[in-house]
């Protein structure tokens, strides 16, 4: 059982790390602010979500599981809000792309 | 073990890179953004140094509240940036500043490197004595409120003095009025959504961090920062307004925490034989009372520091 | 390779990604780009922190990550707010009034 859980951890955390890679590549390579924003807000939430999911089997108490999930939900909420706010700020700085 | 070393080395390099960037960058906003990233990195560094109490403070104050304060300041300074750049110091002044900075850094480095290994420390003795006499489970809280109570008291007063400094920047006609402009509320806006969803959970987390401070890493400063941030979020979304600084309840709450601390401190002179000492057996309840009294003061002070000087005519 | 070792390696990888994202903070060009990179920095930092915390069994790390996640949007909101007060209001919000 613990082997299965460990494999799950490795797969999920690796997938999460991949999305951080994707987000960073998008942030560096995409041509303008709005496309970069798109890459970033998708990738970093997925990345953190998968990392959190992978860490869940390693958590020792139920309370730690709740905290881990809360951390991800907070980050999701922050990512979604910041995505909107940044898009508006970018449009203000350069109204006609 | 080598992997842990790799983590530490990459963290150290990152911290140095970001610090270098903050010094080198010309525009204020860039430096502020660098500082926010730097605060986050420092939180990671403190975790690696096995100091979760400091990491928690850095995460709350360094990354969150100070970042917001500096971003607001940078936005206000934007108009003066060109004028400030015109006054760029000459080569002589810059060389002098560089020499001075390098000398201080070198002196610090020599001082640290010359320390005997292991460095002489009072920490274990202080932690053991404070834990034994106070009955508090977290050594950091015990030391802060028993061994170094004077520091903690002055810290709480210093932030209050800083707030008075900010308020004193208000124009005469706005004295007693509300800090910051009135924010228009957009009920469908994403900010209003965030400000309705996050604070209820954030308040629970803030109180939780405050409450566990007695036994685990956490405490009043970290908890108060989270609560202050939640309040500011509601203010910025336009769902609530900053209180006029002339309000009596506000001023009472602002001084209540330090006053309770000072009163308990002087009572110690009579009951326990020394100022800021606690009578035998009453240490833990008194420490908890001080922490609870300081909490509202700190929330109000930190939030109003970020909200800024009063800008609007006080209500009649 | 044990699970803690794997988690540490993942933390180093995520930190490296975050470091690459720094280039975007350096280059900008818009302030919104810099703010976005800081957001990635925040999410990546939380992920690295969680990986480190679980790998080294440091329980208090969860509370540090919880605080970071809760305040993740805070600096960006402050930025959006300062940008809107210095450059006129958001186009969407003004058109509605």
Image: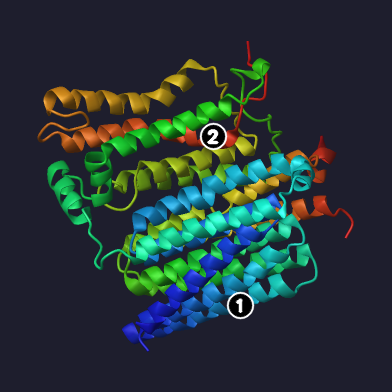
Residue C58 as seen in the image, left or right of residue B106: left
**Farthest residue, direction front:** B92
Nearer to me, C31 or B241: C31
Provide the secondary structure element on which disc 1 rests.
helix
Residue C95 left/right relative to B264: right
**In this view of the protein, can residue A73 be seen by the observer?**
no
In the rendering, at what x and y percent does residue B227 appear?
46, 40
List the residue tagged with mark 2. B305
Residue at 20% from the left image edge and 28% from the top image edge: B275
Most foreground residue, B260 or B144? B144
Disc 1 or disc 2, which is closer to the eye? Answer: 2
- In this view, A14 is above or below B200: below
Query: Residue placed farthest to the top in the image?
Result: B316
Disc 2 is placed on an element classified as helix
Q: Quadrant of residue C66?
A: bottom left
**Residue A45 seen in the figure:** yes
Residue at the spot of label 1: A21
């Amino acid at each position: 059982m613990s082997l299965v859980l460990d494999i799950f951890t490795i797969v999920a955390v690796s997938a999460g790390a991949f999305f951080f890679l994707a987000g960073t590549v998008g942030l560096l390579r995409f041509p303008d602010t709005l496309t970069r924003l798109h890459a970033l807000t998708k990738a970093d939430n997925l990345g953190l979500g998968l990392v959190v999911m992978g860490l869940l089997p390693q958590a020792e108490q139920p309370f730690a599981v709740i905290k881990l999930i809360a951390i991800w939900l907070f980050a999701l909420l922050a990512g979604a809000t910041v995505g909107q706010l940044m898009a508006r700020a970018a449009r203000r700085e350069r109204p006609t792309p | 073990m080598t992997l842990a070393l790799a983590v530490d080395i990459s963290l150290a390099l990152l911290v140095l890179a970001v610090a270098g960037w903050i010094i080198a960058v010309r525009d204020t906003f860039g430096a502020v953004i660098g500082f926010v990233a730097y605060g986050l990195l420092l939180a990671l560094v403190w975790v690696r140094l096995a100091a979760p109490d400091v990491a928690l403070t850095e995460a709350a104050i360094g990354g969150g509240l100070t970042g917001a304060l500096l971003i607001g300041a940078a936005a206000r300074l934007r108009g003066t940036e060109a004028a400030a750049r015109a006054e760029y110091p000459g080569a002589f002044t810059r060389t002098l500043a560089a020499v001075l900075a390098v000398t201080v850094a070198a002196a610090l480095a020599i001082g640290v490197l010359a320390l005997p290994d292991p460095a002489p420390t009072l920490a274990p003795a202080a932690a053991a004595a404070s834990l034994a006499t106070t009955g508090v489970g977290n050594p950091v809280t015990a030391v802060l409120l028993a061994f170094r109570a004077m520091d903690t008291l002055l810290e709480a007063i210093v932030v209050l003095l800083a707030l008075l400094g900010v308020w004193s920047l208000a124009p005469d006609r706005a004295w007693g009025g509300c800090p910051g402009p009135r924010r228009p509320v957009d009920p469908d806006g994403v900010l209003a959504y965030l400000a309705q969803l996050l604070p209820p959970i954030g308040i629970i987390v803030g109180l939780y961090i405050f409450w566990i401070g007695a036994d685990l890493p956490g405490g009043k400063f970290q908890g108060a920062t989270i609560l202050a941030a939640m309040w500011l979020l509601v203010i910025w979304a336009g769902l609530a307004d900053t209180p006029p600084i002339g309000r009596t309840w506000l001023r009472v709450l602002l001084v209540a925490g330090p006053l309770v601390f000072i009163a308990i401190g002087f009572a110690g002179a009579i009951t326990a034989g020394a100022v800021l000492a606690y009578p035998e057996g009453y240490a833990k309840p008194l420490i908890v009372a001080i922490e609870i009294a300081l909490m509202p003061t700190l929330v109000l002070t930190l939030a109003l520091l970020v909200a800024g000087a009063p800008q609007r005519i006080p209500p009649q | 390779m044990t699970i803690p070792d794997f988690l540490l390696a993942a933390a180093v990888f995520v930190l490296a990604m975050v470091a690459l994202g720094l280039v975007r903070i350096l280059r900008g060009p818009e302030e919104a780009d810099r703010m976005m990179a800081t957001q990635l920095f925040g999410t990546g930092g939380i992920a690295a922190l969680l990986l480190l915390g679980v790998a080294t069994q440091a329980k208090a790390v969860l509370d540090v990550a919880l605080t970071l996640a809760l305040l993740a949007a805070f600096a960006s909101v402050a930025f959006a707010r300062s940008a809107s007060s210095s450059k006129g209001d958001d186009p969407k919000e003004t058109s509605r009034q």
